């Protein structure tokens, strides 16, 4: 069973899937950038390109929303989902930009682990978005949303431990400030993943 509103415009779902895939691509590049830093700084430019592509997708969603009278899911959910997905990309780009701009000599293990942890919820979201246009997948999608929440809570634990270690072991106050901002970008990105999961779950509950 699919969403029953007529006419059924699959364009929104296609754009959401494109957004999920683009966001995962950026997260993978950030993971590679953190793991290889400072050997390959060109990845930062590729992440910026992905962020700009995300802006284009968000613009296309909003433009279509403004020109479509009947939407396949609630208008506010379309707007919120596109906005939160864009937030994740912005935060990934912000972390990469700070790593470059602050001239961090070497990324310590914690932000590397943060970037790795971000991959899992984004990949889970990408899968949920691919399934969103078909309600026969509603149980699986709900399960994916629950998994994103679990991963976000797991990332919170890692974040709190990383901040504690940063203040316990780092002596340079400027480096503390720089690294803390990067940590917070990555932690906020996982928070936005949970926001996306909440919106997707709300869509399912409204339409199942």
Image (spheres, rainbow, N blue to C red):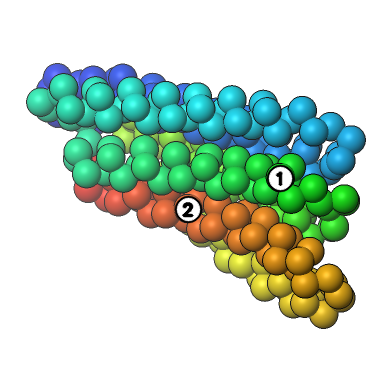
- Left or right? Give the position of 167 relative to 105: left
Residue at 19 percent of width and 38 percent of height: 75
- Answer few, some or many: residues within 10 Å of disc 1's Cα (few below 14, many 20 plus, some between 14 and 19): few
Which mark is first along the chain, 2 or 1?
Answer: 1
Residue 21 in view of the camera: no
Q: Marks 1 and 2: which is nearer the front?
A: 1
| Helix, strand or loop for disc 1 | helix
| Figure disc tally | 2
Residue 32 in view of the camera: yes
Single out the residue that lies furthest toward the left: 69
Residue at 19 percent of width and 40 percent of height: 74
- Left or right? Give the position of 40 relative to 138: right
**Do the residues bearing badges 1 and 2 touch, measured as CB atoms within 8 Å?**
no
Q: Decide: is 174 above or below 12.
A: below
| Helix, strand or loop for disc 2 | helix
Q: Classify the position of the N terminus by image quarter.
A: top left
- Left or right? Give the position of 152 relative to 114: left
- Answer few, some or many: residues within 10 Å of disc 2's Cα (few below 14, many 20 plus, some between 14 and 19): many
The image position of residue 93, as x and y in percent, is 60, 40
* Front in this rendered view, residue 61 or 127: 61
The residue carrying mark 2 is 192
The image position of residue 13, as x and y in percent, is 35, 27
Residue at 74 percent of width and 30 percent of height: 43
The residue carrying mark 1 is 101
Q: Decide: is 26 above or below 174.
A: above
Q: Decide: is 96 above or below 3.
A: below
The image position of residue 110, as x and y in percent, is 79, 60
The image position of residue 113, as x and y in percent, is 77, 55
Q: Classify the position of the C terminus by image quarter.
A: top left
C-alpha gap between disc 1 and disc 2: 24 Å
Residue at 31 percent of width and 19 percent of height: 11
């Amino acid at each position: 069973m699919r969403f029953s509103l007529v006419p059924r415009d699959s364009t929104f779902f296609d754009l959401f899937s494109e957004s999920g895939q683009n966001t995962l691509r950026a997260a993978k590049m950030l993971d590679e950038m953190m793991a290889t830093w400072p050997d390959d700084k060109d990845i930062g430019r590729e992440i910026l390109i992905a962020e700009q592509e995300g802006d284009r997708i968000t613009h296309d969603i909003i433009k279509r929303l403004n020109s479509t009278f009947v939407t396949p899911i609630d208008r506010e959910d379309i707007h919120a989902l596109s906005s939160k997905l864009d937030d994740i990309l912005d935060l990934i780009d912000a972390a990469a930009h700070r790593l470059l701009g602050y001239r961090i000599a070497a990324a310590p293990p914690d932000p590397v682990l943060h970037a790795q942890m971000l991959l899992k919820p984004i990949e889970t979201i990408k899968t949920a978005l691919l399934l969103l246009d078909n309600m026969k997948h509603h149980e699986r999608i709900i399960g994916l949303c629950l998994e994103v929440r679990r991963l976000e809570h797991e990332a919170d634990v890692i974040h709190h431990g990383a901040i504690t270690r940063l203040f316990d072991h780092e002596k340079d106050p400027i480096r503390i400030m720089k690294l803390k901002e990067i940590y917070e970008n990555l932690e906020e990105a996982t928070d936005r993943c949970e926001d996306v999961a909440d919106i997707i779950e709300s869509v399912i509950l409204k339409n199942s």
